[in-house]
């Protein structure tokens, strides 16, 4: 064991000081252990002493417990001074003191010499948002990039899953500890990532629960380990906007996929474009910038006569699968009415009830019938589409 590691874990738990200040202290005194010893010998007076003494854990018990938990589950602890620590992350305003890692650890090394794109977006996605995310990521992976995201439901999950299915590597930066199964809906994806080419990173100790404060703080790491941020779909209050903000602060390029102006789920991403973000109409818009830093990045060749969706053979975009797989003539009268009211983008039940002219009770029965036949898509809200 690195005998200084316990002291780094102790250092990572200090909340009375800025992280950059603690890193400077290690550089000044030589080791994290010396910082520990120096803080024990400080002679302070008045309010300053009360504040600092009340904010510092003056023993190593918690740090030792964290270390033992990591040993139990075989988590890797990467401290700021380790060679494995992502180079890009060292230069952000508040770099993590340590990172906890689980999965394909070799991906951490690749972050230093491979183009890395952080893909983020709304938790409440539209068909368009999901499919355009898949299309872009397939090309980004084929070009040799690593896909980073925040492991949330929605666009994040689509990003991780598509990267794996395309044979690429993907990194999830969590807003909680590695022991916490959050969100539960992504448990199957978590197993796929751990069994495949996936890596989980967190600055939080293994048993740290997710809170509304941990995610915004986590977003600086998403931007920090990436060369560029791609927002494919984001609402006005999406955490993706925080990630984009961190990227801009760090001097990174922010790319945004344009969207219909009347879609609520894209109000935030469209505003980013209005404010000057770069437009991403295809993967090459991003890859051209990455090529300036990484010679191994290759552009994607397109047939100019095809649309982006056609290039990826995304038949579920061009034509709903239900038209091919379900005989709509077998549906009941009410189910047909409800189906005919559906649109390509997910719509709220209230809207579809009004459009179809059905009573709410009849509409709910129709939804169940369509779901059993696989003739309808359901999204959070809930929303429904063809």
Image (cartoon, rainbow, N blue to C red):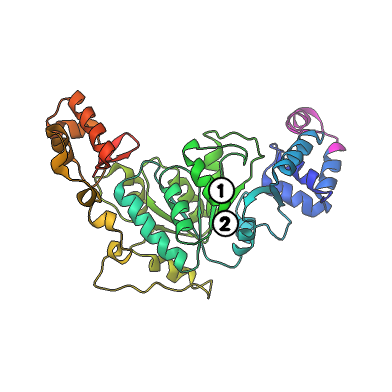
The location of residue 185, given as percent across then percent down, is 46, 38
Observer-side mark, 1 or 2, equals 1
Say if 294 sits above or below 247 in the image: below
Within-10-Å neighbours for mark 2: few <14, some 14–19, many 20+: many
Whether residue 305 sits left or right of residue 74 in the image: it is left
Whether residue 132 sits left or right of residue 39 in the image: it is left
Q: Is residue 48 magenta?
A: yes
Picture residue at 47% right of the left edge, 46% below the top: 242
Q: Which mark is residue 380?
A: none
Magenta residues (range) = 40-58
**Which secondary structure lies at badge 1?**
strand
**Which secondary structure lies at badge 2?**
loop
Which residue corresponds to mark 1?
A: 173
Which residue corresponds to mark 2?
A: 225
The location of residue 212, given as percent across then percent down, is 51, 34
Q: Is residue 126 magenta?
A: no
Out of 279 and 166, give the one closest to the viewer. 166
Asked if the residue under mark 2 is in contact with the one under mark 1, i.e. CB atoms within 8 Å, the reply is yes
Out of 51 and 34, give the one closest to the viewer. 34
């Amino acid at each position: 064991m690195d005998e200084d590691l316990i002291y780094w874990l102790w250092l990572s738990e200090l909340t009375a000081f800025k992280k950059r200040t603690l890193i400077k202290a290690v550089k000044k005194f030589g080791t994290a252990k010396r910082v520990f010893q120096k803080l024990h010998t400080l002679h302070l007076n008045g309010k300053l002493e009360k504040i600092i003494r009340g904010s510092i854990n003056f023993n190593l018990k918690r740090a030792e417990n964290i270390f033992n938990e990591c040993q139990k589950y075989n988590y890797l602890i990467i401290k700021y001074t380790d060679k494995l620590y992502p180079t890009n992350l060292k230069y952000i305003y508040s770099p993590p003191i340590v990172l906890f890692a689980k999965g394909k650890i070799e991906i951490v090394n690749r972050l230093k010499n491979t183009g890395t794109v952080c893909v983020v977006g709304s938790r409440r996605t539209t068909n368009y948002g999901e499919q355009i995310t898949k299309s872009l990521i397939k090309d980004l992976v084929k070009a040799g990039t690593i896909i980073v995201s925040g492991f949330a439901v929605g666009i994040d999950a689509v990003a991780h899953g598509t990267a794996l299915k395309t044979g690429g590597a993907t990194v999830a930066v969590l807003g909680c500890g590695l022991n916490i199964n959050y969100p539960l809906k992504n448990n199957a994806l978590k197993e796929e990532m751990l069994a495949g080419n996936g890596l989980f990173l967190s600055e939080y100790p293994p048993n740290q629960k997710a809170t509304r404060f941990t995610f915004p703080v986590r977003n600086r790491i998403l931007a920090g380990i990436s060369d560029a941020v791609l927002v494919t779909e984001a609402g006005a209050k999406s955490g993706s906007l925080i990630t984009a903000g961190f990227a801009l602060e760090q001097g990174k390029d922010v790319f945004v996929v344009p969207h219909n102006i009347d879609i609520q789920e894209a109000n935030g991403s469209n505003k980013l474009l209005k404010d000057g973000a770069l437009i991403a109409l295809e993967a090459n818009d991003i890859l051209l910038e990455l090529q300036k830093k990484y010679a191994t990045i290759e552009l994607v060749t397109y047939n100019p006569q095809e649309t982006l969706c056609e290039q990826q053979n995304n038949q579920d975009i061009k034509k709903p699968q239900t038209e091919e797989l379900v005989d709509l003539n077998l549906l009941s009268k009410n189910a047909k009415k409800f189906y005919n009211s559906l649109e390509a983008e997910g719509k709220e039940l209230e809207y579809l009830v009004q459009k179809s002219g059905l009573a709410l009770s009849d509409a709910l029965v129709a939804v169940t019938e369509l779901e059993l036949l696989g003739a309808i898509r359901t999204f959070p809200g809930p929303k429904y589409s063809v």
